[in-house]
Image (tube, helix red, strand yellow):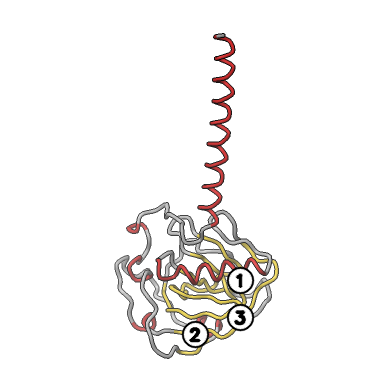
Amino acid sequence: MWANRIVLQGVLLTIVLNLSCVSFRDVSQAVSADICGCAPLEPDAADYRHAAKHVALPDGVPQEIDITTIFSWPEDSIPLPIDQPRTGRELQLVHVALAFLQNASINPGDCDVHMELSAVADKKAPRVVVETPVDAEYCSARQSLQSQLKKNGFQLDIQHGGEIPQPLRVTVLGLPFEDFEHGRGSAQVSTLWEIHPAKVTTE
């Protein structure tokens, strides 16, 4: 009798553990697939000019530019103060009608969608960093980009991303932002200037 009870308890325990593992796995997959559910691994204070990057896009007619325009913008010789607010060019809403998305991933530190764009489809072409913040107001833009990339056979979520085999034509709406050099992407990234925050749409 006791032996049967022990066997039964063992079977029940195995079932509970299996169900727990399945539930945990399902939750983990759901969280990793939720491009708006990323939890930053680093505090806001560790993010360079955090407050300046996490702003809403202003209303108004954007200035039309292209990727090559960004390479011509002068860079400061030393990094701006970490609490430097937006000023000058960083306040001007810009629009890029055509660029090529070469790389896309989610930065685990701040959960922003990190992208690299070039003026042409060549993989060796100079690139500009473009980022879409994790902020709630950009959730729909992040989800739309994720969906568009999926249609093109590319998976973008918390655990997947990287170099895109066939660069995709995109448009960009956002604010210029001057970062500093700290290993910000691939060797093709050729300027400290970014478009950050930004909304990116594939054609």
**Circle nearer the N terminus (1, 2):** 2
Please name which of the two marks, 1 or 2, marks the residue nearer to the observer: 1
| Residue at the disc numbered 3 | 119
Q: Could you tell me which secondary element the residue under label 1 belongs to? A: helix
Kindly check if marks 1 and 3 are in contact, taking CB atoms under 8 A apart as contact.
no
Kindly check if marks 3 and 2 are in contact, taking CB atoms under 8 A apart as contact.
no
Q: Could you tell me which secondary element the residue under label 3 belongs to? A: loop
Residue 92 point in image, percent of width and height: 39, 85
Q: Say the numbered circle drawn on residue 148.
A: 1
Amino acid type, residue under disc 2 in the picture? His
Disc 3 residue crowd, few under 14, some 14–19, many 20+, Cα 10 Å = some
Q: Report which quarter residue 146 is drawn in.
A: bottom right
Report the residue at 59% width, 78% height from top: 170
Amino acid type, residue under disc 3 in the picture? Ala
Residue 17 point in image, percent of width and height: 54, 31
Disc 2 residue crowd, few under 14, some 14–19, many 20+, Cα 10 Å = many
**Circle nearer the N terminus (1, 3):** 3
| Residue at the disc numbered 2 | 95
Report the residue at 56% width, 86% height from top: 97
Q: Could you tell me which secondary element the residue under label 2 belongs to? A: strand
Q: Is residue 102 above or below residue 155?
A: below
Q: Is residue 54 left or right of residue 13?
A: left
Q: CA distance from mark 3 to mark 2?
A: 13 Å
Q: CA distance from mark 1 to mark 2?
A: 19 Å
Please name which of the two marks, 3 or 2, marks the residue nearer to the observer: 2
Q: Report which quarter residue 46 is drawn in.
A: bottom left
